[in-house]
Image (cartoon, rainbow, N blue to C red):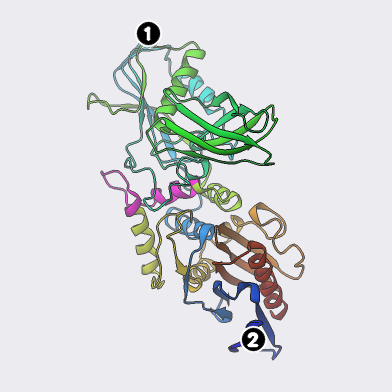
């Protein structure tokens, strides 16, 4: 197979030519609208690793959310398809005549799916209350304590941007998380130039302070941002929201999910007739007597959580999966230890980390960078893994589902499994092509374009032409 690249006079087109084994020739044209863009592209046959097409494949580029493929692949390899998070409900003290003379603990295992709308388990607190009744508890003499000590208190990757922090899609990572670590702020908007009226906040953490600087405009969608940091209940809301809406919901991050989990359980217990003498807290208790495990809540299997990550491009799930990969020691797991675990794992598999900068598990950091060959080589290895069928099932089919439902809709000769990635100046796709019983991996990243539609159109044209030669 011969691969050549040429530049046409006048910069009308930059072309990559691919000569497949059947002597059929295809030219991947780079339109003049992308002449200033950075492109890193590779397509390979996964059985032997033969390169089908490549352009600047060793050049690092910003990947955005295709980074999630690395996180989910590593999690499946390190933890296994059937891994489940286990949140334990424990107590200290003694239970006598229905009264627990001690504290009740929610011991987090880093599960991102407690009360999540993506799993449909939003009524889990009622189930917990029923289980506690079955344990014979009618009254609690101590506190409801959220124990999130499995992870350290550095909830955010250090290279996320201030523009994102405080918004729902940049919620933090906690040893005990709940309700997607998200609050919904329901408001009513009026005429242009006015401020919206806040009607409700759900869940409503104790002490939340909202500084409403939003302005109603003619916009059809919101261009609003929420600013704030983990563990601080102050949130600033700025930007524009649409006019004359009787109900408009703006989503932000939950400042302190562990404490919120304790508050919500305490409220649910009281609503179910179980009295609590103490308070809901996320502050650790002095070491006392031994704790007794009352029951454990198990998440859905990792295969389903990875599917949620890739189908919905869920940053919060991805970051929780990354953190869970940190080595299990007596010390709380850290973000840096988790990233090092990913690096060590793939280096042991022979993956070259030249030009790679991994700063998170979701791709939200604009400081992430790697060459197309890096992710492509991981995809090739996953194609040979016993977890491959599971991994492939976590990636949406282009033109049919997930975040790529409108990508490559006209391609009928092959099945394309693709994860998309986009942020300002970034458009990327990576995954697999299956045609005539053969599987191919691909990674395409385009950076620094003027118009996103130009990048998307070019990527689709390149893939169509490559698939036609397979």
> Which residue is painted at 37% across and 68% down in the image?
347
- Find the magenta span and give its range: 316-337
Residue drawn at point x = 62 percent, y = 29 percent: 194
Vertical placement of residue 69 versus 446, above or below: above
Question: Which residue is labeled 1 in the image?
Answer: 97
In front here: 150 or 429? 429
Q: CA distance from mark 1 to mark 2?
A: 88 Å
For residue 331, what is the image quadrant?
top left
Residue behind mark 2: 10
Quick check: is 325 in the magenta stretch?
yes
Is label 1 or label 2 in front? 2
Q: Nearer the viewer, residue 219 or 334?
A: 219
Which residue is at the front of the view, 128 or 406?
Answer: 406
Q: Position of residue 13 (x, y in %)?
A: 65, 82
Rendered position, 304 above or below 147: below
Asked if residue 370 lies in the magenta stretch, the reply is no
**Mark 1: which secondary structure?**
loop
Dot 1 alpha-carbon crowd within 10 angstroms: few under 14, some 14 to 19, many 20 or more:
few
Name the residue at 40% across, 69% down.
349
From what the image shows, is residue 303 above or below residue 242?
below
């Amino acid at each position: 197979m011969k691969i050549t690249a040429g530049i046409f006079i006048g910069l009308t087109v930059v072309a990559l030519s691919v000569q497949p084994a059947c002597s059929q020739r295809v030219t991947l044209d780079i339109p003049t609208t992308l002449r200033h863009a950075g492109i890193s592209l590779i397509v390979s046959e996964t059985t032997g690793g033969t390169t089908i097409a490549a352009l600047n494949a060793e050049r690092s580029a910003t990947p955005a959310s295709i980074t999630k493929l690395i996180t989910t692949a590593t999690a499946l390899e390190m933890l296994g398809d059937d891994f489940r998070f286990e949140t334990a409900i424990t107590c200290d003290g003694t239970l006598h005549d229905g009264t627990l003379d001690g504290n009740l603990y929610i011991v987090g295992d880093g599960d991102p799916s407690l009360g999540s709308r993506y799993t449909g388990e939003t009524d889990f607190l009622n189930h917990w209350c029923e289980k506690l009744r079955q344990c014979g508890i009618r009254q609690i003499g101590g506190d409801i304590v959220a124990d999130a000590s499995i992870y350290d208190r550095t909830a955010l990757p250090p290279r996320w941007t201030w523009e994102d922090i405080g918004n729902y899609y940049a919620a933090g990572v906690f040893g005990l998380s709940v309700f997607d670590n998200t609050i919904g702020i329901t408001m009513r908007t009026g005429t242009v130039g006015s401020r919206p009226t806040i009607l409700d906040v759900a869940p409503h953490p104790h002490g939340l302070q909202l500084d409403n600087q939003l302005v109603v405009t003619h916009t059809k969608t919101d261009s609003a941002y929420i600013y704030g940091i983990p563990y601080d209940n102050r949130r600033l809301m700025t930007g524009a929201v649409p006019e004359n809406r009787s109900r408009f919901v703006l989503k932000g991050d939950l400042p302190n999910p562990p404490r919120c989990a304790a508050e919500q359980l305490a409220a649910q217990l009281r609503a179910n007739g179980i009295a609590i003498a103490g308070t809901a807290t996320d502050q650790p208790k002095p070491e006392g007597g031994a704790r007794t495990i009352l029951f454990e809540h198990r998440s859905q299997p990792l295969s389903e959580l990875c599917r949620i990550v890739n189908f919905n491009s869920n940053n919060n799930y991805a970051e929780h999966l990354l953190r869970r990969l940190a080595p299990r020691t007596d010390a709380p797991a850290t973000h840096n230890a988790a990233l090092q675990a990913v690096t060590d794992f793939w280096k042991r598999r022979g993956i070259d980390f030249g030009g790679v900068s991994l700063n998170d598990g979701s791709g939200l950091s604009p400081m992430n960078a790697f060459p197309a060959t890096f992710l492509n080589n991981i995809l090739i290895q996953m194609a040979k893994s016993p977890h491959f069928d599971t991994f492939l099932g976590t990636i949406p089919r282009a033109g049919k589902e997930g975040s790529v439902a409108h990508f490559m809709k006209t391609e009928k000769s092959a099945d394309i499994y693709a994860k998309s990635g986009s942020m300002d100046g970034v458009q990327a796709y990576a995954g697999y092509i299956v045609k005539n019983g053969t599987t191919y991996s691909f990674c395409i990243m385009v950076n620094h374009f003027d118009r996103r539609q130009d990048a998307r159109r070019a990527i689709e044209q390149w893939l169509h032409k490559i698939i036609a030669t397979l």
